[in-house]
Structure formats: structure tokens, C-alpha cells
Image (cartoon, helix red, strand yellow):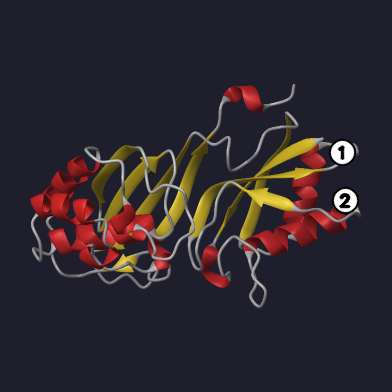
Amino acid sequence: MRFFIELSYNGKAYHGWQNQPNAISVQEVLEKALSTILKTDISIMGAGRTDSGVHASQMFAHFDYEGDFKSIDIVFKLNSFLPKDIAVSAVFEVKPEVHARFYATSRTYHYKISTSKNVFNYDFAYQIQLPLDIDAMNEACKILFQYKDFQCFSKTNTDVKTYNCEIKEAHWTKINDQLVFTITADRFLRNMVRAIVGTMVNIGLGKMKAEELHAVIASKSRSEAGFSVPAHGLYLVKIVYPESIKNY
């Protein structure tokens, strides 16, 4: 039987989601916990990869297990066993062919920028105390909807068949002393969100104009886009699946 696990994590202590040969990952910690509790080797497949230091308020993964357990019991046991920076909110059965990565229809990320020095969020938001023009940054967001190929925002030497992504939502919101970037797409390239935000920051600082984003995207060159903002301000916040994946 195939099960989905829904979880969240603070990525500060981890070298990303995916297993690494010489570094601790969220996937490794979760696999060890599941294997211990279910008394058999469990491998999990995540809905995607988050880089080192990136957080997730909602992540999904699937695993296969032939046996019986009560979902409420396994959630309680996992949360008792896992470290304080990983939390499981649900475990539920899905149809055997459902894949956590390939069945997702959209993913949403937030990127947080703190516009004033804040001793309580410096690990969880990028600190920029220079004035940012949020109107210009939102004008740049509108340009993203006109394109599909976002190679200019992709990490170089990435093994992908296509650089095409369908961006469904992109905007900046000011919440007290924070600017929050929200972006939703059917898929994301490696480092894509952080590169988009870095480019938007350059626009907000007046280093480039919003309309120059057309030329950046058309260039398909990573060197033409802005810098990659730090990982600690990035959050995977929502993954959407068809309701039909569940095995009732």
C-alpha cells in the first residue's frame, strides 16, 4: 500500500530535503524515524527538493508499506520520535500509482524580506534595510506571466528536459516590516525562486527597471538575471494534488 505523509520543517539545520552522502537531510531523518517505528526499512519520495537552509510549512512525501496502522497513532509516534524542527501533520493512504512529485499540480513558495533589523527573525527572513519600491517589483511580477521558458533563473548545469514553467501567481505584499513574495507554478527549476527574488530586489533598489526583465528572460542566461538571495528566507508553503489521489 502507498501512503502520503504531510509534514513541515525548519530547514536551518539541514542540507536540504534530499539525502546527501556526507550531510544530514530532512529525508534521511524522516526515513530513519519511519523505519524505526514500522520496524522495516522505509524509503520515502518527496514532492520536490528544497535546498540547504530552505524551510517548508507544507511538504508531502510518499512511502510504501504492507501492514496495518492507525494514522493518528503513527502521527503521534513520529512527532514523539522526530527532532523539534520536523513535524508531521498527517499520514493517509493513496492509490498505489500516485507519486508525490509527479502528481502535484502546483506548488507555492513564499520569500520573506525584513525591512528593519529584527533580532527575532534574522534566521527566517532576508534583512534588507534599504528602501525597496514594491510597486516596481509588482510591475515586474506581471511580466512573468508572459513567459514560459525561465532558463535565465535556473541553476546552471541542471539536468532537466525543459525549462518551461507555468507561473499561476506572483506578487509582493507588505506585512508590517516584512515584504512577502508569493509565487505559484506547476513546477520550479533549481534555484528559480531565489534568482527571481534577487532580480526583483535589484528592481526594487532601482538598479534595473521592471521592463528590463523582458530582455533578461529572453536571454535565457543566468548571468543576465539577478543574484540568488539567501536560502533562509524561502518557504515551501503549499502543494496541491487532485482530490482523486486518496484511496478511500
Left or right of 197: which side holds 80?
A: right
185 or 123, nearer to the observer: 185
Asked whether residue 193 appears in the rendered view, the answer is yes
Image quadrant in which the C terminus is located: top right
* Badge number at residue 200: none
Dot 1: what SS? loop
Quarter-wise, where is residue 228 in the image? Answer: bottom left
Q: Residue 196: which quarter of the image?
A: bottom left
Answer with left or right where residue 178 lies relative to residue 17.
left
Q: Which mark is residue 38?
A: 2
Give percent across and percent down for residue 22. Answer: 66, 78
Q: Amino acid at mark 1?
A: Phe
Q: Is residue 208 left or right of residue 225?
A: left
**139 vs 150, nearest the viewer:** 150
What's the residue at 19%, 56% (across, down)? 216
**Image spot of residue 157 (x, y percent):** 43, 65
Q: Secondary structure at mark 2?
A: helix
Q: Which residue is mark 1?
A: 69
